[in-house]
Image (cartoon, rainbow, N blue to C red):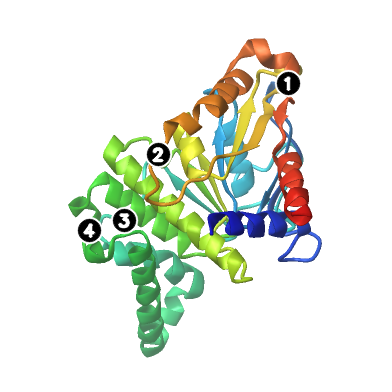
């Protein structure tokens, strides 16, 4: 069954199944960025399709956060363009959500009210809530119902009435993810979201990401648009390979590295199902590739060798059609 799902994914991405010629949720087109004389990003190009879960890795200080802020629209690039659903990202937009390592929840709100808070700000105004109080109460009930659905999805049904001070770090991070998902962003950015968590909690949240990806596969199998397009920044290479379907490496170790970092690695990840044993043996070869291509200065002259994601998928698609 998983093989059938993978063929559906390959066909959808390579044929532009959902939206005419392309179903790209995110396009990064010849992006450069500099802070004064300091050049950080150098000709970064990336296309992310709807339903992909992409892990972004790279050396400290290579510009991963700069790239995320360019996607988010808070710091547009100094050269090139970032598009989400075909629109240039020149300012923050509901189309892109972000969850940081240090969650920002309101201490005075319960989990469900924290999750629903963004909907209140986006769909109502203070005058509306004051002068149309009965209508606001009906709308508020709908917001809380949607918040409950998201909390159930991230495994926090029983904690919906808890305050942040009553929750563990892992629970608070789940609430933050639900808070972002309720806005239905076209692209969700996760900036080292599990970095401050213990190993057991980290694995629980990794499993949650795999479950979201399974929802994407099920949607594609049903001829529906996949609901989640996610980019996760992580410094853990095993995590990058485990939770994603694609790993992208950003690095300054390339032939023009003096002018900033670029993409030096872009390959499919192994893909695991929720509950499937984490077979680290599957990671060894690819992890060694990533260390060599992304983190080794000695590999700089051959930095395009592993930028092969779409080439590999086109080959798989051709094989599937031939079969």
Report which residue position mark 2 lands on: 278
Q: CA distance from mark 1 to mark 3?
A: 41 Å
Which quadrant holds residue 267?
top right
Name which residue lies at 27% across and 45% down. 169
Tell me if residue 67 comes above or below residue 71 in the rendering.
above
Report which residue position mark 3 lands on: 106
Q: CA distance from mark 4 to mark 2?
A: 33 Å
Mark 2 packing: few (<14 Cα in 10 Å), some, or many (20+)? few
Q: Viewed as shown, does residue 69 lie left or right of 108?
A: right
Q: Earlier in the sequence, mark 4 or mark 3?
A: 3
Q: Earlier in the sequence, mark 4 or mark 2?
A: 4
Most extreme residue toward the top is: 298
Q: CA distance from mark 4 to mark 3?
A: 9 Å
Mark 4 packing: few (<14 Cα in 10 Å), some, or many (20+)? some
Which quadrant holds residue 179?
bottom left
Q: CA distance from mark 2 to mark 3?
A: 35 Å
Q: Earlier in the sequence, mark 1 or mark 2?
A: 1
Residue 302: where, in percent of width, then height? 74, 18
Mark 3 packing: few (<14 Cα in 10 Å), some, or many (20+)? some
Report which residue position mark 4 lands on: 163
Q: Nearer the viewer, residue 178 or 65?
A: 178
Residue 186: where, in percent of width, then height? 60, 59
Report which residue position mark 1 lands on: 259
Asked if one can make out residue 142 in the rendered structure from this viewpoint, the answer is: yes
Q: Are marks 1 and 4 in contact (CB under 8 Å)?
A: no
Tell me if residue 162 comes above or below residue 124 in the rendering.
above
């Amino acid at each position: 069954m998983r093989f059938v799902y993978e063929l559906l994914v390959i066909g959808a991405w390579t044929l532009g199944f959902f939206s005419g010629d392309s179903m790209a949720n995110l396009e990064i087109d010849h992006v450069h960025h500099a802070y004064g004389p300091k050049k950080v990003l150098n000709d970064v190009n990336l296309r992310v399709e709807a339903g992909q879960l992409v892990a972004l890795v790279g050396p400290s200080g290579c510009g991963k956060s700069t790239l995320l802020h360019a996607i988010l629209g808070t710091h547009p690039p100094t050269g090139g363009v970032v598009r989400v659903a075909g629109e240039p990202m020149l300012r923050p937009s509901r189309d892109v959500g972000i969850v940081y390592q240090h969650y920002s929840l309101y201490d005075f709100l319960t989990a469900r009210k924290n999750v629903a808070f963004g909907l209140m700000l986006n769909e109502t105004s203070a005058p509306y809530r004051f002068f149309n109080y009965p209508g606001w109460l009906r709308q508020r009930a709908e917001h809380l119902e949607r918040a409950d659905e998201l909390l159930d999805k991230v495994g926090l049904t029983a904690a919906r009435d808890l305050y942040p001070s009553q929750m563990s770090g892992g629970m608070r991070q789940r609430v933050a993810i639900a808070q972002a998902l309720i806005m239905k962003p076209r692209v969700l950015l996760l900036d080292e979201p599990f970095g401050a968590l213990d190993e057991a909690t980290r694995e629980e949240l990794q499993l949650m990401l795999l479950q979201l990806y399974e929802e994407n596969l099920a949607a594609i199998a049903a001829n529906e648009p996949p609901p989640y397009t996610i980019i996760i920044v992580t410094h853990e290479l095993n995590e990058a390979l485990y939770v994603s379907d694609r790993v992208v490496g950003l690095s300054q170790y390339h032939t023009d590295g003096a002018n900033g970092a670029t993409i030096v690695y872009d390959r499919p990840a192994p893909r695991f199902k929720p509950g499937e044993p984490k077979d680290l043996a599957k990671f060894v070869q690819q992890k060694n590739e990533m260390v060599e291509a992304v983190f080794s200065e000695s590999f700089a002259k051959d930095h395009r060798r592993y930028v092969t994601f779409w080439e590999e998928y086109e080959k798989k698609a051709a094989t599937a059609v031939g079969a």
